[in-house]
Image (cartoon, helix red, strand yellow):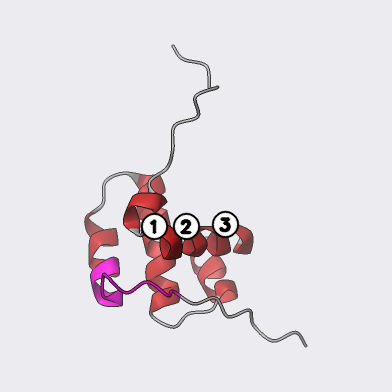
C-alpha cells in the first residue's frame, strides 16, 4: 500500500481557520475551490483526502498548494487566458 502524499502549506500569513472562513465567503467559484483545497491541506488533510472531498484531481490540489506557498492568496486567483476567444 502506498502511503498518502503529504503536501504542506508553508505560508502562514493567514491562519488555517481563516482560510476556511474566507472560502465560505468567496463568490468566485474557481477561487473558492482553490482556497478550500489549501484550507483543507493547512488543516491537516492529505492530498488524497482533499481530492476525494472536493472531487478534484490530486494534481490540481498539489498545484494550488504550490501556488499558495509561493505567493499567497493572490497567486490562487484564476488567471484569464489571453488566447481565449472573446465575445
Residue 74 falls within the magenta-colored stretch: no
Residue ID at (26%, 46%) = 27
Neighbours of disc 1 within 10 Å: few (<14), some (14-19), many (20+): few
Which of the marked residues, 2 or 3, is nearer the chain's N terminus?
Answer: 3
User: Is there a contact, CB below 8 Å, between mark 1 and mark 2?
Assistant: yes
Question: Disc number at residue 71?
Answer: 1
- Of labels 3 and 1, earlier in sequence is 3
Percent from the top left, x then y, of residue 56? 56, 58
Q: Secondary structure at mark 1?
A: helix
Residue sitting at x 75%, y 84%: 2
Q: Residue at x 57, y 57 (%)?
A: 60
**Circle number at residue 60:** 3
Q: In this picture, which residue range is highlighted in magenta?
A: 9-19
Q: Main secondary structure of the magenta part?
A: loop
Residue 72 vertical position relative to residue 79 in the rendered view, above or below: below
- Using the numbered discs, state the Cα–Cα distance from disc 2 to disc 3 in whole angstroms: 10 Å
Amino acid at each position: 500500500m502506498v502511503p498518502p502524499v503529504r503536501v504542506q502549506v508553508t505560508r502562514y500569513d493567514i491562519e488555517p481557520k481563516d482560510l476556511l472562513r474566507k472560502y465560505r465567503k468567496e463568490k468566485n467559484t474557481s477561487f473558492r475551490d482553490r482556497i478550500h483545497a489549501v484550507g483543507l491541506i493547512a488543516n491537516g488533510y492529505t492530498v488524497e483526502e482533499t481530492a476525494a472531498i472536493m472531487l478534484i484531481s490530486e494534481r490540481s490540489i498539489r498545484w494550488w498548494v504550490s501556488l499558495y506557498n509561493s505567493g499567497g492568496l493572490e497567486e490562487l486567483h484564476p488567471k484569464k487566458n489571453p488566447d481565449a476567444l472573446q465575445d
